[in-house]
Image (spheres, rainbow, N blue to C red):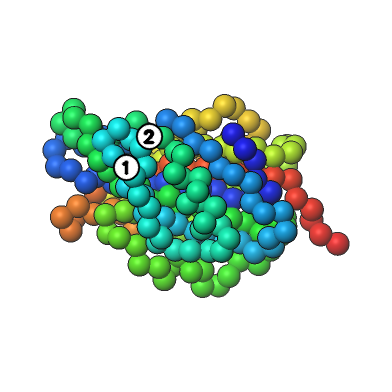
Amino acid sequence: MRFGSTIGFILAAVTATAQGEWKPPRLASAQVGAAPWNVQSGGIAALDVSLDAAGAVVSTSVVQDLAPFGALLNEDIRSWRFEAARDGGQAVPSRVLALGFFRPPALHFAAPSSPRYRNTVAPEELPWPTSVVVPPYPPNAIGSAKVILESDISSRGAVTAVRIVSPPTAFDGAAADTARQWKYRPAARAGKPVDSRAFLVFSFVAVSAGP
């Protein structure tokens, strides 16, 4: 796993594309590259990602861009591997929302009063965040780490379960607590809200508090 130079977190949220008993994909492996050292901005970049019946990424399209992070996220996502979604026990194609939240390289910053994600229109087949919380840098942690989590999202848009799937770190508690606070517009099938699953990568790095 490679470490970035900003605190960011990447979210991949999954919904069904087939009928029957549905089991969404699970993340098998993922890497996130380093952010450019001289970038001072932050925000959200998001992609609509299609997976085949083997869990491989076959195509991506932009839901919300943020230069230069959108291009970097797109490059990273193409190497991600999933355990395929299953419908009635059979492996099937599915769609994934991959979302990166990139925090400016500062311990303290003013959040925008009207963040872009609240006005972005995402495909209804994919869940979309309506309330995002930034993970704090834990006071007992040192250095940098990435925490990969799996979140279940209900048909009402609430996070019902969070599971850490990466090796233990001092950042796990902050990452899991933050993931539980996110709220979503739920995914929909045939116009009806459904349960979905989200995969998140929270990236932490020690940064200067400034002058």
- Residue 192 shown left or right of residue 120 in the figure: left
Please state the horizontal and vertical placement of residue 164, each as a whole percent of the image.
Answer: 50, 32
- Residue 26 shown left or right of residue 90 in the figure: right
Q: Considering only vertical position in the picture, is 28 above or below 156?
A: above
> Which element carries disc 2, helix, strand or loop?
strand
Residue that mark 2 sits on: 82
Please state the horizontal and vertical placement of residue 161, each as a whole percent of the image.
Answer: 40, 38
Query: Which of 98 and 107 lies nearest the eye of the viewer?
Result: 98
Q: Dot 1, crowdedness within 10 Å: few (<14), some or many (≥20)?
A: many
Please state the horizontal and vertical placement of residue 21, each as a whole percent of the image.
Answer: 17, 35
Determine whether label 2 and label 1 are within 8 Å by CB. Answer: yes
Mark 2 and mark 1 lie on one chain; the one further toward the N terminus is 1
Q: Which mark is residue 197?
A: none
Q: Residue at x 22, y 36 (%)?
A: 92
Q: Amino acid at mark 2?
A: Phe
The quarter of the picture where the N terminus appears is: top right
Query: Which of 41 and 109 lies nearest the eye of the viewer?
Result: 41
Query: Which of 143 and 34 lies nearest the eye of the viewer?
Result: 34
Res. 136 in view: no
The quarter of the picture where the C terminus appears is: bottom right
Please state the horizontal and vertical placement of residue 192, each as a whole percent of the image.
Answer: 18, 55
Q: Amino acid at mark 1?
A: Leu
Residue that mark 1 sits on: 51
Res. 65 in view: yes
